[in-house]
Amino acid sequence: MTHPFLDLAPLSAAHFASIEDRVARLLGTEQDVVIMQGEALLPLEGAIRSTAGPGTVALNVITGPYGQTFGNWLRDCGAEVIDLAVPFHTAVTADQIREAFTERPDIDFVSLVHAEAATGNTNPVAEIGEMVRAHGALFYLDAVASIGAEPVLPDAWGVDLCVIGAQKAMGGPAGVSAVSVSERAWSRMAANPGAPRRSYLSLLDWKARWTDAGRTTLPHAPAQLEMLALEACLERIESEGLTTVMHRHATAAAATRAGALSLGGGLEPYVHSATEAAPVATTLRTPPGIIASDLVATALKSNPALPLAAGGGALAKEMVRVNHYGVDATAEAVQNSLAALGTALAEQGVSVDGEGARRAVEGAWR
């Protein structure tokens, strides 16, 4: 008996290359784009290990847990790491980047997360990219959460390594990812004796065996299901229009923020300024005495499919996350999420205004 998900013909090199080309168009980039056969942590780690090593002086911006991870990888490579950590309820500024360059003119690598879905903030990459480019440092950007939810323009912003994943705003699979690579980044890798070679982490292997070889023979068998799913979500974005998709995410974020403020009960936006809040997810601080993980567990009892989660680690006590990305960037998902949180708060004796929240969401969506 045949099965559409099991009896798949091998994905051809031409088909694989055509999907890479569509990713490049999504990013508006002339840089090489390499699709990696794994979750976005694969190119995120591979790009750092390929370009950093002893002698690298890295400015690592921390606005959430992924920035902390990047710092660990950089140190493991032998780089000197200067952590620029800002409170998770805000974003880093270009002035802070400028000050770091002034204090350490030898910085030659900058790592940054665009949108932190885990903490709900987003960073001003265009302004920061201008600063990094003027300084001459290599610019590494995690755009996994932001792609599809807000502009991601590696060429215009001077990003040398731009990593994306399909599992957030693109509404696609988690098992495949991509990275755009500038000529400067390729040169840095080629000169780095510690860059992974003959390794699953290696970008240089892809360059030698795939990109520079004319993209005619794949280095190994691709993950067909994930590649086809990536192609499908690219088609869906192209059909809806990237601008429309981004507007839908921005509206979902505005509606969630407005609805949470109207709901009351002590639930308030974790990111203080709406201009620094990510369009992919809204984080909310719970009122004193309410454990966020318990609140989310109660809210999910009525509907486990709601895009709700508690913060990770220590943030599980105080942070609720509404993940309004991909198929959940809709008025219905926002309404249902806030209604469930309101019911859960009411069960703990907290007074809320569910009707006010509903009206606020409708108003923001209109």
Image (cartoon, rainbow, N blue to C red):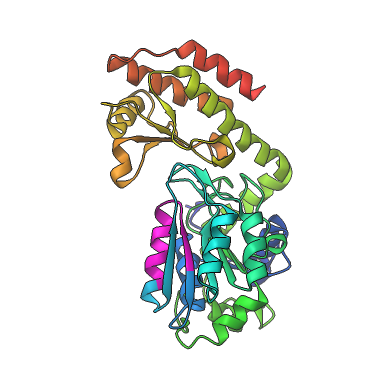
Q: How many marks?
A: 0
Is 238 on the left-hand or right-hand side of 224?
A: right
The magenta-colored residue range is 59-74
- Answer yes or no: is residue 163 visible: no
Q: Is residue 162 magenta?
A: no
Is 96 on the left-hand or right-hand side of 49?
A: right
Seen at 47% across and 64% down, the residue is: 60
Seen at 68% across and 57% down, the residue is: 153
Q: Give whichever of 175, 257 is nearer the camera.
A: 257
Q: Residue 132, how many percent across, how many down?
A: 62, 66
Q: Residue 110, how many percent across, how many down?
A: 53, 67
- Answer yes or no: is residue 120 visible: yes
Q: Residue 179, how many percent across, how many down?
A: 58, 65
Q: Residue 168, how many percent across, how many down?
A: 52, 47
Quadrant of the rendered image containing residue 276: top right
Seen at 48% across and 82% down, the residue is: 195
Is 205 on the left-hand or right-hand side of 76?
A: right
Q: Is residue 72 magenta?
A: yes
Q: Give whichever of 142, 111 is nearer the camera.
A: 111
Q: Quadrant of the C terminus?
A: top right
Quadrant of the rendered image containing residue 161: bottom right
> On screen, 139 above or below 66?
below
